[in-house]
Amino acid sequence: MKKNVFQLRFSHMVLLIFLFLCFSPQFSCASAPKSVDLIYDMSTQNLSVTINHQTLFAGMHHIKYVEIKKNGMLISKNIYGTQPTGSIFTYTYNIPVQKGDVFEVTAICNLWGHKTSTLIIDATASVAEIPAAPKEAVVAPAPVAETPAAPKEAVVAPAPVAETPAAPKEAVVAPAPVAEKPMLEATTIALNVKFNTAKAVVEKKYHNDIKAMADFMKAHPGATAVIEGYTDNVDKFNEPEKNIKLSQARAESVRQYLIDNFGIDASRITAVGYGPAKPIASNDTEKGRQKNRRVQVVIETVQTK
């Protein structure tokens, strides 16, 4: 009797294990992404990455990494703990580009496989030449029979005509000289101001570094500055726009510091946030991410001859 009960329980256990292996998402549903489609909007400088990846349990089986390379260099590696509802979804990243830049985007499943797509910015398609229309044959005109010339009439010389005095020429006034536009020279300066994770507060220890920039602008009254804010690529909540807002806040903090502490005219300073774009170090290490949480300044001055 006990032997029969043991055999029955053992059979049930084997059946449960079989069903688990058949229906577990980690074994039966793990699959690589089917497609990765890329669209770039020049007006907003946004790269849209649309991924087709089927899953039944997004918390256990999802796209974990989205790696973005520009011109062969890794500029962003975004980490996700789940994926949006549905098999087709889109992530958006703000990345400035130039004509001819090449994007290479790879979506990597946390359990199995990956998919890579490439996009060339502003690649012009070749235009087929239109064949020229065939020239019409030129037909020589038929010969015309000559007619005898009429006798020439006597030519009478016309009576002399009294000359009229020429009207005086108007004086030509030379156009006024046009003032040349001043030539501007742009200089990019890496401002030694770093930020803590998810923070946009300028610490007092960077006062002297910002003062050096203020002194330069006071010495060059015609100079203007664009303060560019950046972040690392950490995106814990799957909301890429938060990094853009954070980088904008960091640039605004430095701008306001210049206005409040050194009296620089607000009309001479602009603040722009670029998020995780243009990293200067690897985002795979804490030290590299710290370097990428930065602010840099582009100063335009009038170029002297």
Image (cartoon, rainbow, N blue to C red):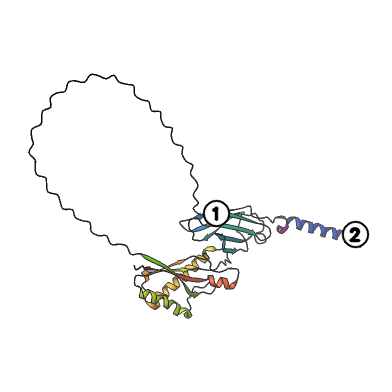
Position of the C terminus, as image quadrant, is bottom left
Q: Seen in the image, is 101 located left or right of residue 180?
A: right
Of residues 188 and 262, the one nearer the viewer is 188
Report the amino acid beneath label 2. Asn
CA distance separating discs 2 and 1: 65 Å
Q: Which mark is residue 119?
A: 1
Judged by its main secondary structure, the magenta piece is helix
Q: Which mark is residue 4?
A: 2
Of residues 86 and 38, the one nearer the viewer is 38
Q: Which residues are magenta?
A: 25-29
Q: Which mark is residue 74?
A: none
Q: Quadrant of residue 13?
A: bottom right
**Image position, residue 246 (x, y; %):** 50, 68
As for residue 134 lying within the magenta part, the answer is no
Position of the N terminus, as image quadrant, is bottom right
Q: Which mark is nearer the camera, 2 or 1?
A: 1
Report the amino acid beneath label 1. Leu
Q: For the residue labelled by badge 1, is the local secondary structure a helix, a strand or a loop?
A: strand
Whether residue 256 is situated above or below residue 16 in the rendered picture: below
Q: Residue at x 59, y 72 (%)?
A: 286
Mark 2 Cα-neighbour bin, 10 Å: few <14, some 14–19, many ≥20: few
Numbered marks: total:
2
Q: Seen in the image, is 299 located left or right of residue 284?
A: left
Of residues 219 and 305, the one nearer the viewer is 305
Q: Residue at x 48, y 80 (%)?
A: 205
